[in-house]
Image: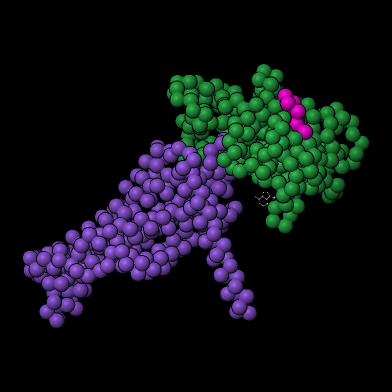
Chain colours: A green, B purple
Amino acid sequence: MISVRNLYKTLGTQSILSGINLQIKRGETCVIIGRSGGGKSVLLKHFVGLMKPTSGEVLVDGEEIAGLPERKLGAIRKKVGILFQSGALFDSMNVEENIAFPLREAGIKDLKLIREKVAEALEMVDLGGEQKKMPENLSGGMRKRVGLARTIVGRPACILFDEPTTGLDPIASDSINHLIRRLQKRLSVTSVVVTHDMKTAYHTADRIAYLYEGRIYFLGTAAELRASQDPIIEDFIEGRSGETD
Amino acid sequence: MILPFLGRTALSFLSYLGQLLLLVNETARALVVSPIRWRLFFRQLVEVGFRSQLVVVVTGGFTGAVFAAQTYFQFNRIGMESAVGAVVAVSMFRELGPVLTGLMVAGRVGAAIAAELGTMKVTEQIDALRALGVHPIDYLVVPRALALMISMPILVAECCGLGILAGYFVGTKVLGISDAYYLNTMIKFTGARDIKMALTKGFVFGLLVVFIACHQGLNAKEGAVGVGRAPTEAVVIGSLSILIVNFFLSFALNIFYPGGV
Ligand SMILES: Nc1ncnc2c1ncn2[C@@H]1O[C@H](COP(=O)(O)OP(=O)(O)OP(=O)(O)O)[C@@H](O)[C@H]1O
Ligand SMILES: [Mg+2]
């Protein structure tokens, strides 16, 4: 579905990604873990052309998108939805209008249908009945879930989740984990989940990729990750900084 | 020391100009290749046009009034007070109306546009638009640009109109210039050329304000400082460019709409 070859990205003078190779298979859930500031969000933005690689290729459904002009990317973005780490809600619109936005853009005019789909999407993220609130009156976790509802409402074939559970309470996190699984099982959505929440990683992943120093350091199943003897990987999943008091 | 500095300044000026022209070009292209979002356009028309009227009209009114008074004080001494109406009308149309309206709109609308787009930029809302397959130029810049292109000439007309009305009131009712003389000279010395000049300048200043403000907003830097800087710079650059462009425009337009009787 998405395939990245030899991706390099430099921002300013800082080299963020240095030679990423990764294939996301159709229908799978691939989790990307890595240190904060390691470039996970940057990598994700390349998958929908929100950022252009310094060099390398990004292919979505076999089509090279790195060189496409902004106006040609519309078709890709109908297929691949992204949940931003910050939620990125439109603050001039209330919750309902935010979630209805992709539907209206897709040309749906039937207001009743839109209202139903919005309510359904809100139910999926456990926010039923919050339609009329403005984004500034939502908590961080609620904003993220509204963002999630906006991302899934248009039923993209592939969804990129940038830290879907960070900032949520354990119960809400668990429900989002189940939602990601459900989307995969029922609607055969392809998912890429960026997270540093190991619980989310283990729960949702078919495969886990560990982004380390700008490269994919490890790629394998959750069981393989847990079984790994590599100290760099062990430190990350155990959460060891190597410091003592 | 000084030469490299001048070189760098010239370079950054040219690069700024280039970026601005790119934005204008993209906006023009958007008008052709994608449908206009009328709802957003009307909302902006209300926001930037309708709601700017009070500010512009008050500015025009008081400027016309004080200008009439000052002109009277000077002209009175040489017995030419009947010319006050003509001086006020011509100056309002040709210079004061468009420039003052431009400056007020740069302050009110330019700042608001830069702040709004800047906030959207740093909170990833613009990326969210793009991710949902909506081009930010279509959605944000085109409606604002169209709204200002249409509102600015109207606002300039209102500013000039109120200025002339206030000048007339002060000149005839307060300072006692004869009604008939005032109107007669005013009509004799003002013509369609002056009104055309006012409207043309208004249109150009509207373009300056909207593109400078959108550029500042779309290129806002992360953080509170970055977002805070966008509206300030939009107002400063917008106002200065209005004053500078006005100078050249006056000469250029004088060819098409020459002054005098
Ligand atoms: N627009 C940008 N301009 C310049 N540098 C950027 C930009 N976006 C990200 N960076 C830099 O790229 C690096 C990676 O950022 P990124 O947001 O991808 O990290 P991350 O892995 O998602 O971290 P986190 O887990 O905290 O979200 C950081 O050092 C950041 O400073
Ligand atoms: Mg991130």
Question: Residue at the location (75% across, 52% down)?
Answer: A15
Question: Residue at the location (69% across, 21% down)?
Answer: A188
Residue B13 locus on image (x, y percent) = 54, 66
The reply to whether the magenta stretch includes residue A131 is: no
Q: Is residue B1 visible?
A: yes
Question: Residue at the location (13% across, 74% down)?
Answer: B81
Residue A115 locus on image (x, y percent) = 48, 23
Relative to B82, does residue A187 appear above or below in the rendering?
above
List the single residue furthest toward the top: A186
Asked whether B156 or B198 is in front, the reply is B198
Residue A212 locus on image (x, y percent) = 81, 44
Question: Image check: B97 left or right of A8?
Answer: left
List the single residue furthest toward the right: A229
The image quadrant of residue A77 is: top right
The image quadrant of residue B38 is: top left
Q: Is residue A129 visible?
A: no
Question: Image check: A16 left or right of B24?
Answer: right
Q: Main secondary structure of the magenta part?
A: loop
Quarter occupied by the C terminus of chain B: bottom left
Part of the protein shown in magenta: A23-28
The image quadrant of residue A164 is: top right
